Image (cartoon, rainbow, N blue to C red):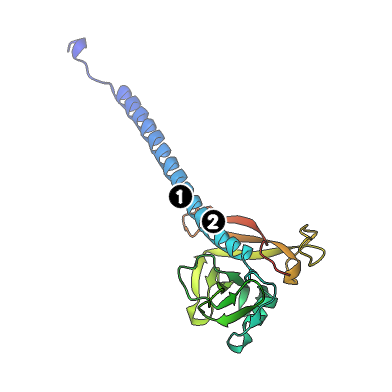
Amino acid sequence: MKHSQRGLSLIELMVSLALGLIITLGVLNIFISARSTYTLQNTSAAMQEDARYLLSRMSQEIRMAGMFGCLATVADNSTGATFSAAFNRPINYSIDNTNGTVLTLATSDVGSAGTLPTWTILSDCRSAATAYTGAATPGSGQMAFPIHQVVYTFKNNAIYTGTGTSQQVLLSNVSAFSLMFGLANSASDSDTTVTSYTTAAPNPAYIRSIRITITLLDPSTNTETKLGNQVFSVVASMRNRLM
């Protein structure tokens, strides 16, 4: 047989196959790594978006808590005089084994998609302001201030909004939820400096800011692309207090 017609030897064939296998494994490893990175980035982005939505919503409502119109005194004409309790404590926070962690806010309407307010304050912004249950139509020379009572509950690894049968899941896969209140030395409006912090529910007149902290869990069951706990927090300053 002529030398020019000789084929591949067994050694050359084995070397070629080995090189091909190495290249294939390298490409496959790059593909798996890229796919894992893509999954992690998508999961992280989704968790950040969930946290951003909740924290932005709660921050906006906290900033408007205690904003009860243009006068510091409001007459209570609501059914069962329920407005007075909200007026005296627009921010209420409780923790117990039965109901979980509950944050209740009495907040001015910040765009609730046309939902019926809990109360409406009618005021001429000069001498009188009166709170009524539900919606109320202002008379001549009056302004209407819709007030919503918003309830957030953390239990069973989820944050709910609403109460009773109307309670709905707002965010799931939550492993922890906590509030820390930044307090001033006095209830004076001019005293805006935070001098101490507490996790208990203090006198609302002393609250100047609230730090909200949530810990989210990656719902994925894939151990290779599971992010684990992700902690998010934001500080909301109180801006609408009438003493």
What residue appears at the point 34 percent right and 30 percent down from the top-left corner?
Answer: 20
Residue 195 figure quarter: bottom right
Residue 152 at x, y = what percent?
Answer: 57, 71
Q: Name the residue under label 2.
A: 52
Depth check, front residue: 73 or 234? 73
Q: Pointer 2 and pointer 1: residues touching (CB < 8 Å)?
A: no
Which label is found at residue 42? 1
In 3D space, how far apart are the residues under numbered discs 2 and 1 (Cα atoms)?
Answer: 15 Å
| Three-letter amino acid code of the residue under disc 1 | Asn
Residue 6 at x, y = what percent?
Answer: 21, 16
Depth check, front residue: 82 or 25? 82
Quadrant where the C terminus lies? bottom right
The numbered mark, 2 or 1, whose residue comes first in the sequence reads 1
| Three-letter amino acid code of the residue under disc 2 | Arg
Residue 185 figure quarter: bottom right
Q: Is residue 96 visible?
A: no
- Picture layout, residue 130 above or below residue 174: below
Depth check, front residue: 219 or 91? 91
Residue 205 at x, y = what percent?
Answer: 74, 69
